Image: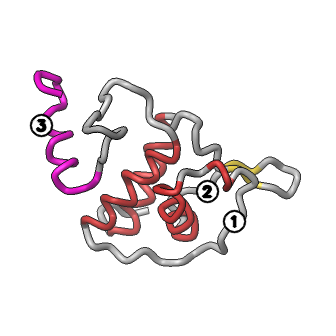
Amino acid sequence: MKGHWASVEVGWAASKGIVLGRGENIFDPDSKVSRQEMAAMIGRFIEYEKVSLPIVNQQISFVDASQIADYAKNYVNTMQMAGIINGYDYKNGTFGFEPNGTSKRSEAVQMLYNMCLIMGKVKP
């Protein structure tokens, strides 16, 4: 990361446990972010801020739950019940999270906005 334009920001987030990298002290700053990675980063930020998340939704049984990495499972479930993330409605009575899919910019903004609503940082 030395010399990367985001090294200060990544260093701060890493020092707070918000980002953990991809193993062996590798952050890979220019790679795409998966949906489960995004959920874990937001979840860790919420923990860092010591925010208690409300339960506003029943837990969804995602059809692809077995594909969610162990490090992200709790974050995905907790944030889904808090209304930060929703997953994809497949319109046949099932929902998927698509954990290894790339987090779209609009999805990332929606997750951040929902988190900020809960934290009282924005008004609806």
Q: Is residue 25 above or below residue 46?
A: above
Disc 3: CA contacts within 10 A as few (<14), some (14-19) or many (>=20): few
* Front label number (2 vs 1): 1
Q: Is disc 3 placed on a helix, strand or loop?
A: helix
Q: Is the C terminus in the top left, top right, bottom left or bottom right quadrant?
A: bottom left
| Mark 2, residue position | 86
As drawn, the residue found furthest toward the front would be: 24
Question: Which mark is first along the chain, 3 or 1?
Answer: 3
Left or right, residue 124 beside residue 95: left
Looking at the rendered image, the disc whose residue lies closer to the viewer, 2 or 3, is 3
Kind of residue indicated by mark 1: Ile
Circle 2/circle 1 CB separation < 8 Å: yes
What separation in Å lies between label 2 and label 1 (alpha carbons)?
A: 9 Å
Q: Which residue is mark 3?
A: 8
Q: Decide if residue 75 is on the left or right side of residue 100.
A: left
Marks 2/3 in contact by CB < 8 Å: the verdict is no
Q: Is residue 83 magenta?
A: no
Q: Amino acid at mark 3?
A: Val
Left or right of 50 on screen, residue 123 = right
Seen at 48% across and 62% down, the residue is: 75
Give SS at disc 2.
Answer: loop
Circles 1 and 3, Cβ within 8 Å, touching? The answer is no
Q: Quadrant of the N terminus?
A: top left
Q: Which residue is mark 1?
A: 60
Q: Type of residue at label 2?
A: Asn
Give the CA separation, mark 1 to mark 3. Answer: 37 Å
Query: Spatial distance from mark 2 to mark 3, Cα to Cα?
Result: 31 Å
Instruction: Give the vertical position of 34 relative to 63 (above or below).
Output: above
Q: With respect to residue 21, does 3 lie above or below? A: above
**Residue 46 at what x, y percent from top left?**
33, 64
Q: What are the residue bounds of the magenta stretch? A: 1-18
